[in-house]
Amino acid sequence: MKILVTGGLGFIGSHTVVELQNSGYEVVIIDDCSNSSENVLEGIFAITGKRPVYEKIDLREKEKVGDFFTRHADIMGTIHFAASKAVGESVEKPLHYYENNLSTLIYLLKEITAKKRQSFIFSSSCTVYGQADKMPITEDAPVKMAESPYGNTKQIGEEIIKDTCKVNSGLQAISLRYFNPMGAHPSAEIGELPIGVPQNLVPFITQTGIGLREQLSVFGDDYPTPDGTCIRDYIHVVDLAKAHVVALERLLKGENPENYEVYNVGTGQGSSVLEVIASFERVSGKKLNYSIVERRPGDITTAYADTKKANEVLGWKACSTLDQAMKSAWDWEQKIRN
Ligand code: UD1
């Protein structure tokens, strides 16, 4: 069965392509390589022994999207990762984010709803909850006012899909709200490749560990948490990738009573920044050079998932520990730098 993965050369996308191929799906990737590289195809091939079909398309080019679906009329499902994802950049370039993350979603949905029955998985984020009032965060926690255009594109994206599902019974869709993805494939053939200075904690840690950055800045130690640093739910990217496959299969098998659903994808475990650093030091055997600095504007104190819905309804559970995820991130960092 043929599945389209947009952004399939990116961090989460490439790991999901691997899991789809390992589950027997025929994958077609669309990527514009704006934040990824065609070399990732070699990594996917090294792991799975299969080469996915790949087309370099910018999804903002509406005609090309139409032409793609004409040529691949047998696509049964789409997993839509392609989007810009840097929170700070989205504040600087709001129109780029709204255009890149939302017009592309609309063009895809226009093509997809023209077909009879289609499954659609959307990359959403726990950012939609803002600072939730209760931990762990359940899916029915209120969606808070977005802190950034990036976060807003995830909220609006979910609304666009929900509204489209209401009037298209053939469209079966799931939004997956990711907590904090980290790590790499255990083979170290694919992993995270941030361009420039990493904005996220784990790649900054591994790049500091390898000597590419001098020091990690820990953004604040005066939060109301046990050690004063922020708490997040770090999930191994391979666990996250597997969640996409089970979500897709639920839709393909028609096991979903509603044609639009939302799931949290996290471990259910919160870890502080200092605990993540300690994990790095355990798995690498290295001391990490870090210092405590001011809080980063816009950071929330604590976010970790209630994963009951995904566990019970999807039958999916994160398996990896923080140390296992960290080891995979460290193995990958060492491999790409050597
Ligand atoms: C951010 C995005 C989220 C996105 C996620 C993964 C926001 C509000 N949320 O989450 O939508 O899905 O990235 O891409 O921006 N930290 C440091 N030093 C650093 C980097 C981070 O101390 O150099 C701390 C942060 O303060 C935070 C934690 O590490 O407490 C995690 O930060 P980060 O990896 O950037 O993810 P989030 O901000 O949680």
Image (cartoon, rainbow, N blue to C red):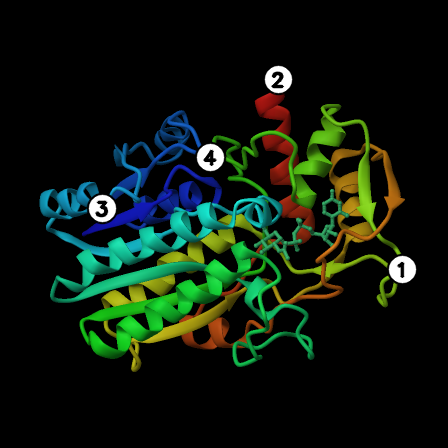
Residue at x 26% of width, y 48% of height: 4
The disc placed on residue 35 is 4
Residue at x 59% of width, y 50% of height: 91
Q: Is residue 81 visible?
A: no
Q: Residue 283, percent across and down?
A: 74, 39
Badge 1 density bin: few <14, some 14–19, many ≥20, Cα 10 Å? some
Q: Is mark 1 on a helix, strand or loop?
A: loop
Task: Please tell me in which quadrant of the rendered image residue 197 appears.
Answer: top right
Q: Nearer the viewer, mark 1 or mark 2?
A: 1
Between 248 and 293, the one lying in front of the other is 293
Residue at x 80% of width, y 27% of height: 214
Q: Which of marks 4 and 3 is in front?
A: 3
Q: What residue type is labelled 3?
A: Lys
Between 60 and 213, the one lying in front of the other is 60
Mark 2 vs ligand 1: CB below 8 Å: no
Q: What residue type is labelled 4?
A: Asn
Q: Is residue 269 above or below residue 41?
A: below
**Sequence-wise first label, 4 or 2:** 4
State the CA–CA distance, disc 1 to disc 2.
38 Å
Q: In which quarter of the image is the C terminus?
A: top right
Badge 2 density bin: few <14, some 14–19, many ≥20, Cα 10 Å? few
State the CA–CA distance, disc 4 to disc 3.
20 Å
Q: Is mark 2 on a helix, strand or loop?
A: loop
Mark 3 vs ligand 1: CB below 8 Å: no
**Sequence-wise first label, 2 or 3:** 3
Q: What residue type is labelled 2?
A: Asn
State the CA–CA distance, disc 2 to disc 3.
41 Å
Q: Which amino acid does label 1 sit on?
A: Asp
The disc placed on residue 222 is 1
Q: Residue 299, percent across and down?
A: 72, 58
The disc placed on residue 62 is 3
Residue denoted by label 2: 338
